Amino acid sequence: MKPVQSTLQKWMRQNQNFQEHYAKIRQEILSDPEIKALIAEHPELTKKEIDKNLIKLHEFKTQSKQCSHCTCFNDCMNMIQGYSPVLNVEGGEIHLSYEKCYRRIDYEKQREQQQLVQSLYMPKQILEAKIDHIDADPKRSQAVREIVKFISGCEQEIPSKGLYLYGPFGVGKTYFLGALANKLKEMYISSALIYMPEFVREMKASMKDDSLNKKLAYFKKTDVLMLDDIGAEMQSPWFRDEILGSLLQYRMMEGLPVFFTSNYSMEELETHLASTRNGVEEVKAGRIIERMKQVSQPVAVFAENRRT
């Protein structure tokens, strides 16, 4: 009989401790300012409903609300990373849900923006270029003005013409394209920045795995296409007519702009495009140049070589 009494007394002490602990936790939860305010706003909430949802209320209390206790997205302390708890009452019942916190929204925004700039074989320096970092060189002022004008136009509708930036090596033509791509990214406008010599090799290689049409379709439809160093690639009638011609024809018909950089003027580029192993094909080269004029306007960039 003694062991039974002993066990009973022990259970009663433990049970009393549990009740005291439960009451303390309940008081702490209901003393939370936000929970207290919610209960005050909804007098229809019964004690039974509140007690039934103490776990939800405790979860709400211990989570960071809109990053109040988080230093950054990666250090989020919440049960669901990047989501902030929300309490509401419907039909006399307490509901706990989660919504994206502003740090997660910013994180997703940055990821989405990063995906807006696609590039083929462009150096890191160009991909990190910024409009604000372009210095005020009078010899490049027309190009800068035209780029700023294009960006301004994008606030209403993407202009149908880009720029054909031509001039000697090292004057900053490619940097302009990188800076423009990053500015467009901030405006949620997609762009593709392509180094032409490697683009030619990419398209030829794509014939082996049947991915050519898929890749070409993407470049046709991107909001703003940028072709860097056109004329530097090994010229072939196939690439000129089937790839470049098709690409420019689609964008011309759809009113989509193209930006080019080149060491050639358009007249010089026409001569370059006409020269093939099969002889001089002036008509076909002229057709390409006419399409280029429909999707871009020429702007000369003659300044000091910044690579020396």
Image: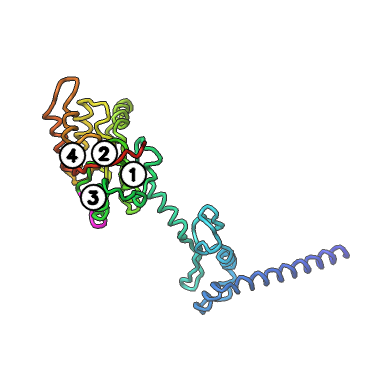
Query: Identity of the amino acid at label 1?
Result: Gly
Q: Is any atom of residue 12 visible in this view? A: yes
Query: Identity of the amino acid at label 3?
Result: Glu
- Placement of the C terminus among the 4 image quadrants: top left
Q: CA distance from mark 4 to mark 2?
A: 12 Å
Residue placed furthest toward the left: 283
- Which numbered tag is attached to residue 222? none
Disc 1: CA contacts within 10 A as few (<14), some (14-19) or many (>=20): many
Q: Is residue 142 above or below residue 35?
A: above
Left or right: 52, with 285 as reference point: right
Q: Are marks 4 and 2 in contact (CB under 8 Å)?
A: no
Disc 2: CA contacts within 10 A as few (<14), some (14-19) or many (>=20): many
**Magenta-drawn stretch, dominant element (helix, strand or loop):** loop
Give the residue at mark 2: 261
Q: Considering only order in the chain, which callout, 3 or 4, is on the residue closer to the N terminus?
A: 3
Q: Is residue 119 above or below residue 160?
A: above
Q: Are marks 2 and 1 in contact (CB under 8 Å)?
A: no
For label 3, the SS is: helix
Left or right: 280, with 56 as reference point: left
Q: Residue at x 24, y 31 (%)?
A: 231
Residue 34 counted in the magenta span:
no
Give the residue at mark 4: 292
Residue 266 point in image, percent of width and height? 18, 36
